[in-house]
Image (spheres, rainbow, N blue to C red):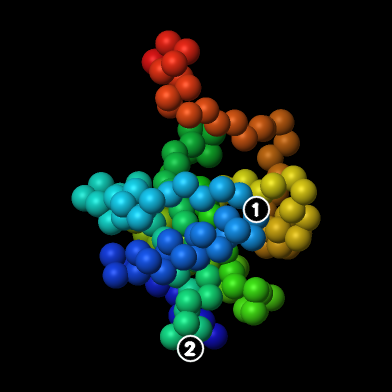
């Protein structure tokens, strides 16, 4: 059974490596620098946390999460922006363990009452994984994003 723990500054390179593997697996670009990742995880005012899974001293999974607040749900939650499990350990409950660890940490730190995440429409394996854990698709919602620089260029902010 793997060990789960919150990443510490000494884990920065390991976190970066696993996030790069996730991006590679999804065929996504990876734009985070070590400096940006370090600030986000380990500054005086961190904007996220990482939960690591290790089996026999070897990293095998990672979850990256940020707090969110919802007036609809009446409290704090946690958005899981990234979840990765190594190919050779998939199907062993590590992903579920990471999500459970994230939920527990968020509940103890922010009194979080829910988890939220997004999954690519064409990633049927991931969708099935989350649905089997009890996640529901939120009908009527669309995940939307815009770069702050784009807002500035448009004069919106």
Q: Is residue 27 left or right of residue 2?
A: right
Q: Nearer the viewer, residue 28 or 95?
A: 28
The quarter of the picture where the N terminus appears is: bottom right
Residue furthest bottom in the image: 56
Residue 5 lies, with reference to residue 118, above or below; the image says below
For the point 59% across and 73% down, the residue is 86
Direction top: furthest residue: 155
Residue at 55 percent of width and 63 percent of height: 21
Q: Position of residue 67 (x, y in %)?
A: 42, 46
> What x and y, as percent, mark residue 157?
39, 15
| Callout 2 secondary element | loop
Name the image quarter holding residue 140.
Answer: top right
Question: Is there any visible trace of residue 65 in the rendered image?
Answer: yes
Q: Position of residue 49 (x, y in %)?
A: 39, 57
Upstream in sequence: badge 1 or badge 2: 1
Image location (x, y in percent) of residue 120 = 69, 47
Taking depth in this image into account, of 92 and 41 the one nearest to the observer is: 41
**Which residue appears at 47% of the width and 82% of the height?**
58
Count of numbered labels shown in the rendering: 2
- SS at badge 1: loop
- Write the residue at 48% across / 36% down: 70
The answer to whether marks 1 and 2 mark residues whose Cβ atoms lie closer than 8 Å is no
Q: Which residue carries the number 1 mark?
A: 27
Vertical relation: 117 (above or below) 129: above
- On residue 142, the disc is none
Q: Residues within 10 Å of mark 2 (few under 14, many from 20)?
A: few
Q: Nearer the viewer, mark 1 or mark 2?
A: 1
Q: Residues within 10 Å of mark 1 (few under 14, many from 20)?
A: few
Report the residue marked by disc 2: 56
């Amino acid at each position: 059974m793997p060990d789960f723990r919150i990443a510490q500054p000494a884990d920065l390179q390991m976190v970066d490596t696993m996030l790069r593997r996730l991006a590679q697996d999804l065929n996504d670009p990876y734009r985070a620098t070590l400096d940006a990742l370090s600030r986000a995880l380990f500054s005086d005012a961190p904007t996220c946390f990482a939960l690591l899974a290790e089996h026999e001293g070897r990293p095998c999974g990672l979850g990256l999460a940020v707090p969110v607040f919802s007036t609809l749900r009446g409290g704090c939650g946690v958005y899981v922006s990234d979840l990765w499990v190594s190919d050779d350990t998939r199907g062993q409950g590590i992903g579920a363990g990471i999500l459970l660890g994230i939920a527990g940490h968020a509940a103890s730190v922010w009194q979080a009452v829910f988890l939220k995440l997004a999954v690519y429409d064409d990633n049927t394996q991931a969708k099935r994984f989350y649905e089997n854990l009890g996640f529901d698709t939120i009908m009527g919602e669309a995940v939307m994003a815009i770069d702050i620089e784009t807002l500035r260029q448009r004069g919106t902010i």
